């Protein structure tokens, strides 16, 4: 097996762990809220605490990965959030849990910007969409496995042991990462020269400077379209990671103890991630990078929003779960494309640009987390927020008409063009 696929496997394992850890609060919600007497509004603030910290630390952790390398930074953030996963199981009050959740998220914020940096170093440009699709597919598998693991643990030992076990898994991954990963392909023991040539063909890696050109970023309309798309996109994405278990249990009266209703959306989401990554690379070779990325983003989010609206309006609970599952599948169809475009546009500052996109996404997550709880408390209507989220996701899809993956962030002394013979490869001149 080629070494870059082993690297991808380790990164995919981390993707599973991130989603086991971050969805644990929502899946174990009934035990936690009952034990600590947490209201719906307070639960919304717990979800928002994650989003706020996750958003704040996106750019800093991405910049640190660009500057110091992905190996040490990813090691530190995984150790940090794994310890606070363990501390979550020790919380005895809402305030303590709120603080722990914030600190937990400040570490996990570094996961995906640094995973993107690793992919940009270890994969040729033409394979990055597929590599991202596997990463995001495994996040959804983590979401699907979460209730299947959490429910039995919670029933036998209580909700606290969920966080003790999941935190321990993260610490074990950190040990594996430190001994296995190498910053650059040429440093990996046993890698062939042929594979090094495949990875580095027609490509140059330049270490990012100490400063990000924020002036250019603020004037870049293309980048603004990308981050605003992701801002709206995360209204839908974070619903599935946060409020969905409570919505199905309280809003729809479903028995979620078996985990089936909670796992199905993430299983279809995993399929959507995989298909989206491969589809965008295929389309990029046939119609060019610009429309190869754009078509996937536009189509996926329009369909996702429509499915969420249909789910909320449906009187049949089974149809509701099916449509929500399809909604996540279509939404996740666009996810690898979003992160691929961030690295396409970002170039040597891929970590910082990915972090900026994700930071704006977390602002959307925060608004949704708090707003959902307050809207339900005031209206006692669990379906109204879903309809609003569906409309917002459709707006996110329309923004893809303004996003062009071939317009790279300007960098003095370099121009980036897409070669005619292979639109998936980017040449630096």
Image (tube, helix red, strand yellow):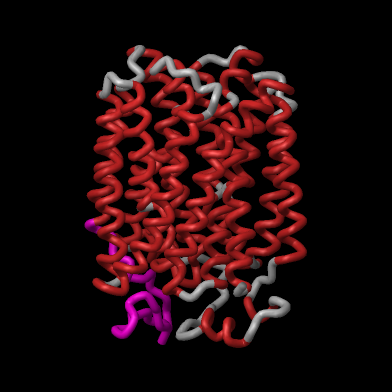
Left or right relative to 10: residue 362: left
Residue 166 vs residue 51, the one in the foreground? 166
In the displayed structure, 280 sits above or below 310; it is below
In the displayed structure, 309 sits above or below 358; it is above
Residue at 37% in and 75% down: 424
Examine the image and state in which quarter residue 118 appears.
Answer: bottom right
Q: Main secondary structure of the magenta part?
A: loop
Q: Position of residue 307 (x, y in %)?
A: 28, 36
Q: Position of residue 156 (x, y in %)?
A: 71, 22
Q: What is the span of residues highlighted in magenta in the rendered image?
A: 401-429
Q: Is residue 219 visible?
A: no
Residue at 42% in and 79% down: 412
* 256 is within the stretch colored magenta: no
For the N terminus, the image quarter is bottom right
Left or right relative to 121: residue 216: left
* 423 is within the stretch colored magenta: yes
Residue at 25% in and 42% down: 394
Q: Position of residue 225 (x, y in %)?
A: 30, 55
Left or right relative to 120: residue 307: left
Residue 65 vs residue 154, the one in the foreground? 154
For the C terminus, the image quarter is bottom left
Residue at 49% in and 67% down: 349
Q: Position of residue 278 (x, y in %)?
A: 39, 63
In the displayed structure, 30 sits above or below 82; it is above
């Amino acid at each position: 097996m080629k070494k870059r696929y082993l690297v991808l496997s380790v990164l995919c394992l981390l993707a599973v762990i991130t989603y086991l850890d971050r969805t644990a609060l929502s899946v174990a919600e009934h035990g936690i809220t009952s034990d600590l007497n947490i209201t719906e509004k307070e639960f919304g603030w717990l979800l928002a605490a994650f989003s706020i910290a996750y958003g704040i630390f996106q750019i800093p952790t991405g910049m640190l990965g660009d500057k110091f390398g992905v190996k040490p930074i990813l090691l530190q953030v995984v150790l940090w959030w794994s310890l606070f996963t363990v501390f979550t199981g020790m919380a005895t009050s809402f305030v303590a849990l709120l603080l722990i959740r914030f600190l937990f998220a400040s570490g996990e914020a570094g996961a995906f910007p640094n995973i993107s940096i690793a992919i940009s170093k270890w994969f040729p440009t033409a394979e990055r969409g597929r590599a991202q699709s596997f990463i995001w597919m495994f996040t959804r598998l983590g979401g699907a496995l979460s209730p299947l693991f959490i429910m039995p643990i919670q029933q036998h030992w209580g909700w606290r042991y969920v966080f003790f076990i999941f935190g321990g898994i993260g610490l074990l991954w950190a040990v594996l990462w430190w001994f296995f990963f190498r910053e650059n392909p040429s440093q990996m023991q046993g890698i062939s020269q042929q594979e090094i040539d495949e990875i580095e063909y027609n490509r140059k890696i330049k270490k990012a400077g100490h400063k990000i050109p924020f002036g250019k970023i603020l004037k870049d309309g293309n980048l603004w379209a990308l981050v605003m798309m992701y801002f709206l996109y995360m209204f839908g994405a974070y619903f599935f990671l946060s409020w969905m278990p409570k919505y199905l249990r309280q809003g729809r009266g479903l028995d979620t103890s078996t985990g089936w209703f909670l796992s199905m959306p993430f299983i279809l989401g995993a399929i959507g991630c995989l298909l989206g990554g491969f589809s965008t690379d295929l389309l990029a070779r046939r119609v060019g990078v610009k429309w190869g990325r754009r078509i996937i983003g536009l189509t996926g989010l329009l369909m996702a929003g429509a499915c969420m609206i249909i789910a909320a309006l449906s009187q049949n609970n089974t149809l509701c779960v099916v449509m929500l599952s399809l909604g996540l599948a279509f939404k996740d169809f666009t996810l690898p494309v979003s992160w691929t475009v961030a690295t396409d546009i970002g170039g040597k500052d891929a970590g910082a640009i990915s972090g900026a996109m994700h930071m704006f996404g977390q602002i959307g997550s925060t608004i949704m987390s708090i707003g959902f709880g307050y809207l339900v408390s005031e209206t006692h209507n669990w379906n109204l927020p879903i309809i609003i989220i569906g409309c917002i996701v459709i707006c996110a899809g329309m923004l893809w008409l303004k996003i062009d993956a071939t317009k790279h962030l300007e960098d003095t002394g370099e121009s980036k063009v897409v070669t005619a013979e292979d639109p998936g490869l980017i040449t630096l001149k």
